[in-house]
Amino acid sequence: MWQKNNKFKAFICFILLVSVLGIPAVMASSTGQSVTVAGYQVSPEVIMPKETGVISITIRNNGSGSAEIEKVSLHSGDLKSVSDDYTRVGVLGPGSSTTLLFKFKAPVEEGIYFPEVWIDVFNSSMIRYPILVNVNTEISPIKGPVIEVEKIIPDSIKPGDEFIVTLSLTNKGQGKANDVNVQIIIDPSVPISLKSPNNFYIEGIESKGIYKLKTEFLSNTNAKLGLYSIPISIRYRGVDGIPKQQNETIGVQIKGDPEISIASISSDPARIDQGDFVTLLIKVENTGTDDAKSVKASVDLPFNGVKSVFLGKIEPDENVPAVFTFDADTGGMYTYNVTISYENNDEAEVISQMSELVVTGSTGILSNKLLLPILITIAIIIGPTLLFSIKILKKKNE
């Protein structure tokens, strides 16, 4: 068991820990990244002297930009780390997290120890976060609240849309979070406004408790397409009364819709005879507000030739020609379908339009090449007879 002076030292260490951990380790940089220690666990919670334990620490990027974690290491003058440092951990995207493990060997003497995890973030200052390790003491430290925020955001938001974002606040700590204040910060440069209040007060969230907030937004009708970040500030107190703050972001993706239509249909030659080699030109236009991707066009004419073409991406206010070539080997009047398929925000869409094509030829529609000789023959045969009849009529009238 502990002696009296050891108990007093441990108690003093615990008070210091509460003061240190009252303000979470946060790093914010000019690039919009904000790296925090979201939480940690020591296993076992109370470790025996010389025993090997494990520290599990979760690092989270709460910013709107990516953060590159260069190195994470465990430092202590009392505990012995038996794990290698983590070098070139990698890039954490907005809202993502990673969990790292460190093995350590407890010292010979019992007590409360505070090894530090050092986090090196590229182009920013180092984070130094203390960890409480209890080596066979009778002191049970107060465990504070840890709030985790889940954001439920609509997948597709268009300019001018009203939309709801649900914030689900879960207290994953072992103490109650009191006087919780949630503030939503709207920058004037962001084409999004709030329809609901920007400040919310929650009296308390118990350990393992969940509190949901519904917030209403409106995107501007002339908003440019893209990803926008809306900062959230969350302040609360643990049972120790020390204020804590964490920063979150809502990522809103404003998307448009492509509107694909057929602008015009023409052929070369304009008047098609049986046996002609035909170029059919169909102009496909996008009158929408977003790109149409993987655009394909096809026609179902019964001729040999090119009847399907890939057009790729068509941007807003752009038209692209779809060129089909074939041999018009049979005369007639043909009704055919023009089909355009494309991707709209990763969803497949299809439009179809009916059109007609006339090929003059031997199937009942006379070719221009045959029509002139036939007219000349008719004129030769009936011409004399017609003139004789006109002369007789003139004599009668006289």
Image (cartoon, rainbow, N blue to C red):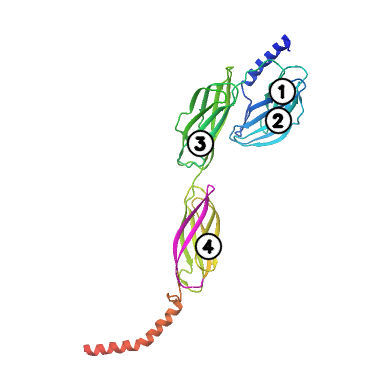
| In this rendering, the label closer to the viewer, 2 or 1 | 2
| In this rendering, the label closer to the viewer, 1 or 4 | 1
Three-letter amino acid code at the position of disc 1: Pro
Task: Give the image location of residue 285, x and y in percent.
Answer: 48, 55
Residue 372 visible, this orientation: yes
Q: Which residue lies most toward the left here?
A: 398
Relative placement, left or right, of 205 versus 68 is left
| In this rendering, the label closer to the viewer, 1 or 3 | 1
In primary-sequence order, the first of circles 3 and 2 is 2
In primary-sequence order, the first of circles 4 and 3 is 3
Task: Give the image location of residue 357, x and y in percent.
Answer: 45, 67
Residue, disc 2: 101
In 3D space, how far apart are the residues under numbered discs 2 and 4 (Cα atoms)?
A: 60 Å
The image quadrant of residue 389 is bottom left
Q: Which residues are magenta?
A: 328-357
Q: Nearer the viewer, residue 371 or 297?
A: 297
Residue, disc 3: 190
In 3D space, how far apart are the residues under numbered discs 4 and 3 (Cα atoms)?
A: 43 Å
Mark 3 surroundings within 10 Å by alpha-carbon count, few (fewer than 14), some (14 through 19), many (20 or more): some
Q: Residue at x 55, y 57 (%)?
A: 311
Which numbered disc covers residue 323? Answer: 4
Three-letter amino acid code at the position of disc 4: Val
In 3D space, how far apart are the residues under numbered discs 2 and 1 (Cα atoms)?
A: 14 Å
Q: Nearer the viewer, residue 70 or 9?
A: 9
| In this rendering, the label closer to the viewer, 3 or 2 | 2
Mark 2 surroundings within 10 Å by alpha-carbon count, few (fewer than 14), some (14 through 19), many (20 or more): some
In primary-sequence order, the first of circles 1 and 3 is 1
